[in-house]
Amino acid sequence: MSRILSRRDLDFLLYEWLDVEALTSRERFADHSRETFDAFLDLSARIAERDFAPHNRQADLAEPTFDGERVTIIPEVAAALKVFNESGLLSAGLDAEVGGMQLPHVVARACFLWFQAANIATSSYPMLSIGNASLLLAHGTEEQIETYAKPVLEGRFTGTMCLSEPQAGSSLSDVTTRAVAQDDGSYRVTGSKMWISGGDHELSETIVHLVLARVAGAPPGVKSLSLFIVPKHHVAADGTVGERNGVALAGLNHKMGYRGTTNAVLSFDDATGYLVGQEGHGLAYMFHMMNEARIGVGSGAVALGYTGYLHALDYARERLQGRPVAAKDPTAPPVPIIEHPDVRRMLLASKSYVEGGLALVLHAAKLLDEPSAENDLLLDVLTPIVKAWPSQWCRLANDHAIQIHGGYGYTREYPVEQFYRDNRLNSIHEGTDGIQGLDLLGRKVVMRDGAGLTLLLDRIRATAAAAPPDLGKPVLNAADRIAATTAKLWAGGDPTVALANSTAYLDAAGHLVIAWMWLSQHAATEGKEGDFYEGKRLAARYFVTHELPRVGPLLDLLDTRDTLLADLNPRVL
Amino acid sequence: MSRILSRRDLDFLLYEWLDVEALTSRERFADHSRETFDAFLDLSARIAERDFAPHNRQADLAEPTFDGERVTIIPEVAAALKVFNESGLLSAGLDAEVGGMQLPHVVARACFLWFQAANIATSSYPMLSIGNASLLLAHGTEEQIETYAKPVLEGRFTGTMCLSEPQAGSSLSDVTTRAVAQDDGSYRVTGSKMWISGGDHELSETIVHLVLARVAGAPPGVKSLSLFIVPKHHVAADGTVGERNGVALAGLNHKMGYRGTTNAVLSFDDATGYLVGQEGHGLAYMFHMMNEARIGVGSGAVALGYTGYLHALDYARERLQGRPVAAKDPTAPPVPIIEHPDVRRMLLASKSYVEGGLALVLHAAKLLDEPSAENDLLLDVLTPIVKAWPSQWCRLANDHAIQIHGGYGYTREYPVEQFYRDNRLNSIHEGTDGIQGLDLLGRKVVMRDGAGLTLLLDRIRATAAAAPPDLGKPVLNAADRIAATTAKLWAGGDPTVALANSTAYLDAAGHLVIAWMWLSQHAATEGKEGDFYEGKRLAARYFVTHELPRVGPLLDLLDTRDTLLADLNPRVL
């Protein structure tokens, strides 16, 4: 069996590159040390390998079913979640006062990557629960935290986020779910919610739905949405789970991948709900969590790509076939396919994507551990890239993994086709790639007079200036170009023109950021010898010479302020 | 329900662009006319829509099963094939003397596209049978044609091609299946064959396997392989199907897509086989058919991409969501998503891929109808591109179709996710993309002192020179660059250096060829008004301005004769 993830790479990134040990000098992490970090990483690897990975294929083949009464899920999922819940990992990153371990985000993120790589579908349940509870910890009342968030963190309850509706996926301003205030301070919530991951199942005593809805009489638009706790069952003040609330499973969606995660259409019919925070602030609360959720999606995309790469690497080392192109003797024994340059291309490209993506995810997570005005701003700018770039490029690593396996890779006898199908979701949920492009170019790089972009480019330039010139110079050039292009795009102030090619902008910025991650890793290998460090340096070189040049034509196009797409008459399609 | 294909586009390509009617001045097609062409196209569309499309999803959900005794396939497949076989389409392109209609290849190809777009899995059975029978018509004895090829063309039998083995996929020199000559002139064939599409089923009275094997005592290498007819059942001289031959189904492969097509591991155990042609010429006979088979794969990739594009187009016109970025009023009604520039980008890109790919496939097919030294040479050079380019880029159209559908596109409630899974195979079978790159750069552009590349570039330059300069000039530049790059790569004569980045070369050449297809289509719209022609002109412009620039960095890389991949120490991965 192939490795799920590379602990060697995680150790390099955490300790040699990001110097995560230094975080222990901060008060929040004072009780931690490399030993405790390692213990959590070891524990995660062990549970992921033993309890999560073995049922990954089975959960794909036998997806959850709904008989009209209840949802049935293969028992291995509940068994794995029981182990996970008992491990303390659910609240590892949270405050000690709510039972957490105050583990740095960056370490918690590395731990969780093991579960995402081992079994993305089963890992979705705790991921959703952590996001759900974290939101309540930040914005809920003490009573809400006691009644809902703590049981979620204990694993007794699970949590969801209910944003989308059948007619409103990316467009939350069109949310029509209604909430009517009652005399007792609660609300009655009615409406239909779509794409609710973990929306129904019997894996927990009850499910805490966080539901975005509009209070009766509130004006249209996103700024009048409110957020409600709507439990699947009523929960008494003493924590007892009682009768069903007015939430029904209208049906399960049948997906191409991520099949082990139930994905539900939920009907809320006069369901009892409890307002979180203030009316009209629902979306702001949700967006408070969005950075983490989007890093979580990017992280899942990295995990799937990474594990696919490792499987392909093992296969390429073992599978004997063909001879070098210069070989003349057909009786020579076949060579491992890793000897063929095109197989190496796919492997090295994949390595550059998954290790580059992993570096970005961990870099972003560490910004959460060292909050400051600058770091918060940088994280804001990076978030759409952290979300979208791995969803595209680590998926390409999954594509390469199939290709390296040849016909075998296309069969369900090998795991790589599932990784490919699973990873396809990550470009869609939590905001599509297109939405991330609009977020980056339409908001993040222009907010505060472009302070975020300036900060990002300053950091990139500092790293590039310190790199060997043949690697640093192309990155410096790309950074200069993207600054100029951004100014040019917004020079007219017309969002239609500026945003007409926002996806090309996201693609260019994404590749620049990953090139930065590679130069930064390259710097961390200085003076170190051995295959591992050679591999890092080679991947950095590969990314700068083979991948970064893609940025040129994208910026050329953007510089023309081309409006072919914005102007076209849709009838000609 | 969305259209399967665009008849309007086929009419444009066949009649307005390729002037297929002019073929009727050739003796072989003298009995044909636009009316007969149209009749075949109408018939194909009708059968594809009525008999093939409706069970496309069902065949995916209920794939063939093997109980150890027999293979079970949903009955709709046999019913569809019965209609197909009775339509005369199996032999439409073949000589009248074997019962064919002498339909031009280009028209037969257009007809078959309907079936591939409607149901790629069910269409595989006749595609394989046609290839099988055509090979025997070209290289078999009269008796072999009577006994095997004619029943295949009547639909009583079906045919396969058995090349790969479990240990030898792309590397046919490692084929180990053995054939031992018997006193009666037959052979005993023993070995294991892998990835045999249509390798077992009960859709026909018997199955005619064409098996690549090595005669006992023959030297190693591809040049000593021979080709054998090995029927599943013995067939008597009078055509009666008798007892089972020594061919057993060892198992079915379970694929990510193309699930409706059985894909088998076959065990040959002293099976009776009959030599086709001469010993040692087996691979040459197979390669004789390879141009057509590879056009068939490229055609399937186009068909899947095209139908996915049409589904996405319909969805984007109907689905209401969001408002233009410049809109301020959240109460304004939502717009069809086709109004969003990023959705338009995906649609226009997809249009440029699928209509560009379709043009290439039909152009290649027409070269078969006008055989000449020049046309044969051009087809040889184009074949790896016809095979690989649509497999990558029309698959990207399928990817875009999912993205345009958002979460819905990721579910099995919509057809686009199946198209995406199905199309993933086309980069693998009949020679992977990597193999096509080696074929193009290692053989096709260097053979005959580069005559093929010179011819291709001459044709491209002639089209580009006649185009509006803003469209023609970038294509002329790319053509000049690829000529220079090719010379530079081979200047040292070292295949390891020349071929180190053959996939980048294939990618660059592919985009150049499709740009040429677009300029040529653009020329055919001259003086014509209306949405359809505007769409063609816009897609041509899009391809030249948004897609062709990808070629620049690829050629830059190739020009450096970069050997990063060839030289790397695999231990660093």
Image: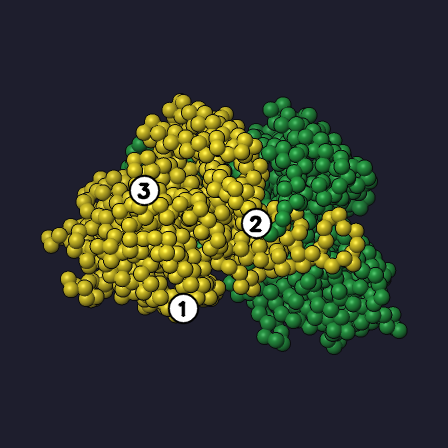
Chain colours: A green, B yellow
Query: Along the horizontal axis of the image, is B249 left or right of A405?
Result: left
Instruction: Find residue B187 and report its horizontal and vertical position in percent.
Output: 17, 53
User: How many other residues sit within 10 Å of disc 3, few (<14), some (14-19) or many (≥20)?
Assistant: some
Q: Is disc 3 placed on a helix, strand or loop?
A: loop
The numbered disc on residue B76 is 1
Disc 2 and disc 3 in contact, CB within 8 angstroms: no
Residue displayed at 45% across by 56% down:
B117
Does label 1 or label 3 sit earlier along the sequence?
1
Query: Along the horizontal axis of the image, is B52 left or right of A145?
Result: left
Return the residue at label 2. Answer: B531
Chain bearing tag 1 is B
Q: Amino acid at mark 3?
A: Glu
> How far is the residue under mark 2 from the one under mark 3?
32 Å
Query: Along the horizontal axis of the image, is B25 left or right of B487?
Result: left
**Which of the two discs, 1 and 2, sits closer to the camera?**
2
> How far is the residue under mark 1 from the one under mark 2?
38 Å
Instruction: Find residue B412 and report its horizontal and vertical position in percent.
Output: 55, 62
Return the residue at label 3. Answer: B370
Task: In the rendered view, tell whether residue A300 sits above or below residue A183.
Answer: above
User: How many other residues sit within 10 Å of disc 1, few (<14), some (14-19) or many (≥20)?
Assistant: some
Q: Amino acid at mark 2?
A: Asp
Q: Is disc 1 placed on a helix, strand or loop?
A: helix
Query: Along the horizontal axis of the image, is B220 left or right of A538?
Result: left
Task: In the rendered view, tell whether residue A21 sits above or below residue B473.
Answer: below
Q: Amino acid at mark 1?
A: Glu
